[in-house]
């Protein structure tokens, strides 16, 4: 049923019999429609307890208002969870150390930083030494507390920057040379890069095998051999560029100069590594072992011009 509101309006009149205002009196025994006795709305399904003191809001059991900010706090505060997290961190740390140890054994990343510690001055001087090594006198590598100094401080120190950049530049120049002869294709360029890399690997492996058979005690490392073997790309680039500019005659003359230069460079560099100290000082070599070391040094140096010609002669038309 609908409850009506009974309002009695009592007019107030003045002497001029004009009604100025009216007041409505509401019967207190009557209540508004859709209201209950306690003043709450009956259409509300749930009671509003947000302002009620001592009542916990909905959430995880046993948590107060402060715990609502981070529901996973209970999980992290569990001792078993903390122990599992600590054990997982320990396993991850051990795995990282194991990977770093095995990786450093096969690929010494920490040592590679030494071979790339170069600057512009070193690169310029080293390129000049590779092309014109005849006037250089001191070929010994400088040491500081039994450790060779960085290449940027010593022009005689081997590096990997020039061989790496030389290899990439050689591939690009090869593509240019093939393009000028209308023989360029991506497949041929890929074969050119693959063959150059395979010959480099075979050369280094052959030198390592020779050092093992001759039983030479030397401080040369595999990375040193890669560096020394990669210096020939500088002469190869100069020869191919000369062939593009001046034809086959310019190619042969320039390549001949670069071959002689790299031969002298390798002889003077490797004799301090492979030959005995007496031979490095210019004393006559005696003994079969020293003779083998001398032949090995000359063989490594003589192999450089052969590879230089083999990898470039077909690029000049």
Image: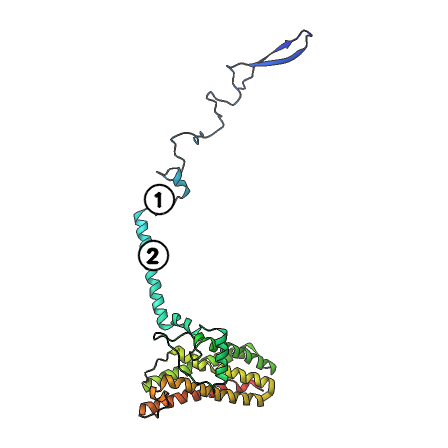
Looking at the image, which is closer to me, 186 or 132?
A: 132
Q: Quadrant of the C terminus?
A: bottom right
Looking at the image, which is closer to me, 142 or 91?
A: 142
Image coords of residue 218 (percent x, y): 34, 82
Label 1 secondary element: helix
Image coords of residue 15 (percent x, y): 67, 6
Question: From what the image shows, is residue 166 above or below residue 95?
Answer: below
What kind of colouring is applied to the model shown? rainbow
Question: From what the image shows, is residue 12 above or below residue 261?
Answer: above
Quarter of the figure with residue 17: top right
Looking at the image, which is closer to me, 136 or 129?
A: 136
Question: From what the image shows, is residue 65 above or below residue 312?
Answer: above
Residue that lies at the very extreme toward the right in this rendered image: 16
Image coords of residue 146 (percent x, y): 34, 75
Q: Residue at x 33, y 53 (%)?
A: 85
Label 2 secondary element: helix
Q: Which mark is residue 74?
A: 1
How many residues crowd mark 1 within 10 Å: few (<14), some (14–19), many (20+)?
Answer: few
């Amino acid at each position: 049923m609908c409850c009506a509101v009974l309002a009695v309006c009592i007019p107030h009149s003045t002497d001029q019999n004009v009604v100025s205002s009216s007041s409505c009196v509401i019967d207190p025994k009557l209540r508004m429609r859709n209201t209950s006795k306690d003043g709450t709305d009956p259409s509300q399904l749930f009671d509003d307890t947000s302002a009620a003191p001592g009542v916990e809001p909905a959430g995880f059991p046993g948590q107060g208002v402060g715990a609502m900010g981070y529901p996973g706090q209970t999980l992290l505060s569990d001792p078993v969870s903390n122990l599992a997290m600590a054990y997982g961190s320990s396993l991850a740390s051990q795995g990282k150390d194991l990977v770093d140890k095995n990786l450093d054994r096969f690929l010494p990343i920490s040592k590679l930083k030494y071979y790339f510690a170069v600057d512009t001055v070193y690169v310029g001087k080293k390129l000049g030494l590779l092309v014109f090594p005849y006037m250089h006198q001191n070929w010994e590598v400088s040491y500081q507390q039994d450790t060779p100094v960085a290449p940027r401080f010593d022009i005689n120190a081997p590096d990997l920057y020039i061989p790496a950049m030389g290899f990439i530049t050689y591939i690009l120049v090869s593509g240019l040379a093939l393009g000028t002869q209308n023989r360029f294709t991506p497949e041929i360029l890929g074969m050119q890069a693959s063959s150059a890399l395979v010959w480099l690997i075979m050369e280094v492996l052959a030198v390592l095998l020779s050092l093992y058979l001759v039983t030479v005690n030397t401080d040369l490392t595999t990375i040193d051999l890669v560096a020394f073997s990669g210096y020939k790309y500088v002469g190869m680039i100069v020869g191919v560029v000369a062939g593009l500019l001046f034809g086959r005659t310019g190619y042969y003359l320039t390549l001949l100069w670069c071959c002689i230069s790299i031969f002298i460079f390798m002889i003077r560099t490797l004799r301090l590594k492979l030959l005995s100290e007496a031979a490095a000082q210019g004393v006559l070599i005696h003994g079969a072992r020293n003779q083998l070391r001398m032949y090995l040094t000359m063989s490594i140096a003589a192999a450089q011009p052969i590879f230089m010609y083999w990898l470039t002669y077909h690029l000049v038309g």
